[in-house]
Image (spheres, coloured by chain):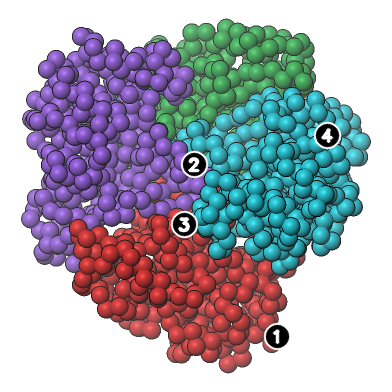
Chain colours: A red, B purple, C green, D cyan
Amino acid sequence: MRVAVIGATGYTGAETVRLLLGHPCVEVVSVTSDRKAGERLDVECPWLATDAVLEESGRALERQDVEYYLLCTENGRAAAIAPDLVPRARVIDLSADHRLKDAAAHAQFYTSSPGSVSDAVYGLPEVVDCEAIRAARLVANPGCHATAALLGLMPLVRAGVVSGTPVLDSITGASGAGRAPAEGFRFSELDSAVQSYAVVKHRHRPEIEALAGMPVRFTPHLAPMARGIELTAHVPLARAMDRQALGELYRGAYHGRAFVRVVDAPPSTKQVLGSNRCDVYADFDEHAGMAVVIAALDNLVKGAAGQAVQNLNLMAGLAEETGLPVSGVWP
Amino acid sequence: MRVAVIGATGYTGAETVRLLLGHPCVEVVSVTSDRKAGERLDVECPWLATDAVLEESGRALERQDVEYYLLCTENGRAAAIAPDLVPRARVIDLSADHRLKDAAAHAQFYTSSPGSVSDAVYGLPEVVDCEAIRAARLVANPGCHATAALLGLMPLVRAGVVSGTPVLDSITGASGAGRAPAEGFRFSELDSAVQSYAVVKHRHRPEIEALAGMPVRFTPHLAPMARGIELTAHVPLARAMDRQALGELYRGAYHGRAFVRVVDAPPSTKQVLGSNRCDVYADFDEHAGMAVVIAALDNLVKGAAGQAVQNLNLMAGLAEETGLPVSGVWP
Amino acid sequence: MRVAVIGATGYTGAETVRLLLGHPCVEVVSVTSDRKAGERLDVECPWLATDAVLEESGRALERQDVEYYLLCTENGRAAAIAPDLVPRARVIDLSADHRLKDAAAHAQFYTSSPGSVSDAVYGLPEVVDCEAIRAARLVANPGCHATAALLGLMPLVRAGVVSGTPVLDSITGASGAGRAPAEGFRFSELDSAVQSYAVVKHRHRPEIEALAGMPVRFTPHLAPMARGIELTAHVPLARAMDRQALGELYRGAYHGRAFVRVVDAPPSTKQVLGSNRCDVYADFDEHAGMAVVIAALDNLVKGAAGQAVQNLNLMAGLAEETGLPVSGVWP
Amino acid sequence: MRVAVIGATGYTGAETVRLLLGHPCVEVVSVTSDRKAGERLDVECPWLATDAVLEESGRALERQDVEYYLLCTENGRAAAIAPDLVPRARVIDLSADHRLKDAAAHAQFYTSSPGSVSDAVYGLPEVVDCEAIRAARLVANPGCHATAALLGLMPLVRAGVVSGTPVLDSITGASGAGRAPAEGFRFSELDSAVQSYAVVKHRHRPEIEALAGMPVRFTPHLAPMARGIELTAHVPLARAMDRQALGELYRGAYHGRAFVRVVDAPPSTKQVLGSNRCDVYADFDEHAGMAVVIAALDNLVKGAAGQAVQNLNLMAGLAEETGLPVSGVWP
């Protein structure tokens, strides 16, 4: 496969490149940065072992030899460029442009224009129909919190046992904000600090609600780590379920999936660091009548670049786990 | 005031000593450690600037010159020693022994014996009647999560607007587990890691429920920092309230209190690090019909040693803020 | 004492304010920020418990009621404003403007203009003549690495036993770079990262050499923490000295000083966090014929704001430890 | 290749398993733990994606189907078991038992018995003769600090320009101490803390000296991160060299090597995290007449497990980079 990564020097773009460099079936034919075009990628990103040179995105988008474009661009950019690309190449959009089908919801949460590729497929392989991903011209890669939330919630939703508004607290690392912002993300100010942001209105909430088909209460929190999401869903249930019953429900839902593992102890974000895995734990608080489901993933891998490569694998007809790490980097 | 700190080398005990060393009206007449008796305290705790020598607790408990005993002991110990102390000295119990009045609840959450001093006062000065603390022979110093939860919840509870089970996620630093445990608390395994523990049954839950007078859903999480709690309460409300109305409710509830500040932006644990302050933020999610209240404090100060000194001040008839830091150490 | 803090919202300025708020003999009559004038200080710095409002520095410099100006300004600014201030108030310059007496050295290491107040006193109380500080119109507050280096080196230098170029590696936290820079100081990029900067030419080197009277080899390193310096000096000695002899030399040199403690085990930066102490450890490597001296301090306290308050105390005729924390905040 | 990992649940052993699970030519036929035999490895190490069951080491050592034993055992154990293994299998010893040829040096630095396999080869492929590694029955895998030090020093040593005792400060993460110790390695006590240990006598010093052929001054420091070494060598030179000349010397020395990269800016430990690379930077301080060389690596990969797999590749006649990550996991 001949792949171009548009926007290769941000956190998501660089992580995508890192995974693709180790992928046995991929040739990275273009990596782009409009600000750093002409420079070697490993000067801007010294952790990457490559001698690739950054190209202007305009030039990369005109290439005829690219089969797959992975768009790691700021919101609004993919919406602008995707319509020209989809007739001649397949596209994975890692930005938010094509995630929400509902234009009103998009307008409520984003200032940028939404994507107009009407048959974009929401690329959460363990939740949506994989055949649709395999056939898609454009895959909308899910948000990181949304990935954790949906992997945690959907087995209960599909079992029809949810009886009230799920409450979700999601604790994430600083890389979720991307490489651009700096003010407010200085090391000295985030170290030894936990705080919330977007307390009552975060952009990943409508993504979750669109697939879950119900409203949710959602608040994200920033913890002093670079990577990782630990999302906890408190879900009112129509009937009491013990931990074993929940375990069976979840194991059944994810049977045979390489990247979702149902675990017997609350997962640490560290056990999935650098891996494309999401570990899910489910327990029942009989006192409150709620299931408590915890999902842990690496926001830059299963929450972004890794999931994009998983979608790429599906689109290319490969096994979805091809070239993707399953074990975490620990300690 | 002549004060003894029983159990001076644990996190809570040493923090208590640190605060008392800077207190203008306190003489620390005894610091104890049964394992390290005879050693200088600053050998075991090199951050403390003192030439005090550690004493065996048995000897310290027999002293006739102590007016206040601060018990920083493992659970069960204060229950055993307090009955002999209260006739001749006043006691602040920083362990959990005297927190729960309900023996059945104690038995459900603790294996150690409960305290038997029947008129113990729960020492949360911004929530309970301060006159009771001023007059108490024994004050039960609240748990760290319970302090954050109750400071966050009680204005809504007392306003009578809570219409369903509050859901609480509390994110805390590793010092909350104390200095004793090590297995499971190694730096390399907690760094870059967030994970939950005691997912459906944590000991601070019945403390919260006893004062709130309602069941709550509570899950604690461990973040990679030494100190701090950021607790989020999602509270179903009987009627819609905007952020301004909530702000007024909270400002009214804490008017004139030195240590609870109602803030206009989600507080970071870092802004209260080393301080006896709890910063509280309240917002309303109209979408879900829930108030979202966030309380941030330093688990070793307002959540333990600082609150104990605040109680000590009240018991001694001093202004409650005497000798206590109000500004945080930042960055 | 009536004190103004010029530049109160940077790391050093805000830390100076924090310490002064707890000082029993100080009234902070002005805190300034040219960008944020008119705002409350606790909006910009929510960790500070104060209702002070930020003032423009121009206005603050014209006040007639200020006895002491503490200049927490970018390099070059103090040089410009100090000449007008010293006739009518006393000044502590926390910037680098007045540190180097040698104009050529200043020009080699700084692009900004040097200070022209000719009788500025270098304010390192444990090394220079305290009488000079007490009498000074302007005190140049030392650099953070220079403070650690000189407290570590001077006893050997003054004993006349140094026989070759000392080699110094200094490991520091991210706050040393100040609040201004952001690019390069994002949390995600410094977390889990140690790296060096200014490998062969750092600005604190000529400060060290000016007082030590000899060249030194100096390299600073950045560790993933907000505060702290651990500086190691490898010092070739003219004659073998065991650890005990070194201990005696150092204890003698710092006898009676509140803020330098000679310790028997390698100090952690954490044991002096938030404190104005510098802990010094000295050992001898007979194999290499070198003393190995380690000094640990908090770069924002003993390395900046705390040392400024120590100098203020001396200038005001107070005991040097007045209002300054001696114990560290730990864990 | 059929490989057994003896001691698979410690930091080094588990990291070895992680790398081998992703290696295209390796079958891991046994993973051992004497304390946890019979348990699944992914219960003890939930970051590993494997269904392997832990075996007692005694049983694993009797297997006839193992071609390579990787010994990730405490010091002294490999010395005891290697003599029986080498006649029938090839061995890589990741402990210190076979590193020092000089029995007196071993006795001075270790209390455990040294290895007795006389033709053990010191497995630092970029420094020693790779043919010897290819042919070895037993490879002694180098210490983590020694790897960084030797990769930094040897080009200068071999150029014959070193004119005095090199001074080395090495800053490392907490995983270097292994998974066993806990007291002293609690998160709360190492977070925000830098401190030195083994100030004048660390076990990796004689390893460095044996290959460098000269004494060195060496002090290790512990920084608040899980992984990584940043080692700085200050090397007195017989003649002045500018940065360009040093760059040429180092580029020449490591020409064609996959895992040592000579870089133009001081490397961060983060850029090699999870990678088998060592990045080396060399500069000259003309003021002090010393080269300043900085080497950064991941102590668990190039400093332990990755280097072991590199040696395994050489022993097996494979390209040395087979199955090993070259890019770092960042941020």
Q: Position of residue B227 (x, y in %)?
A: 38, 40
Residue occupied by mark 3: A269
Please state the chain letter of the residue tagged with numbered disc 2 in the rendered image. Answer: B
Q: Give the quadrant of residue C11.
A: top left
- Residue C111 or C8: which is nearer the viewer? C8
Please state the chain letter of the residue tagged with numbered disc 1 in the rendered image. Answer: A
Q: Is residue B265 at least partly visible in the picture? A: no
Residue occupied by mark 1: A65
Residue occupied by mark 2: B186
Which mark lies nearer to you, 1 or 2? 2
Residue D28 vs D56, above or below: the answer is below
Question: Along the horizontal axis of the image, is D133 left or right of B219?
Answer: right
| Callout 1 and callout 3 share a chain | yes
- Residue C209 or B274: which is nearer the viewer? B274
- Residue at 84 percent across and 27 percent down: it is D164
Residue occupied by mark 4: D101
Q: Residues within 10 Å of mark 2 (few under 14, many from 20)?
A: many
Given the image, on which type of amino acid does mark 4 rest? Answer: Lys
Q: Give the quadrant of residue C264.
A: top right
| Callout 4 and callout 2 share a chain | no
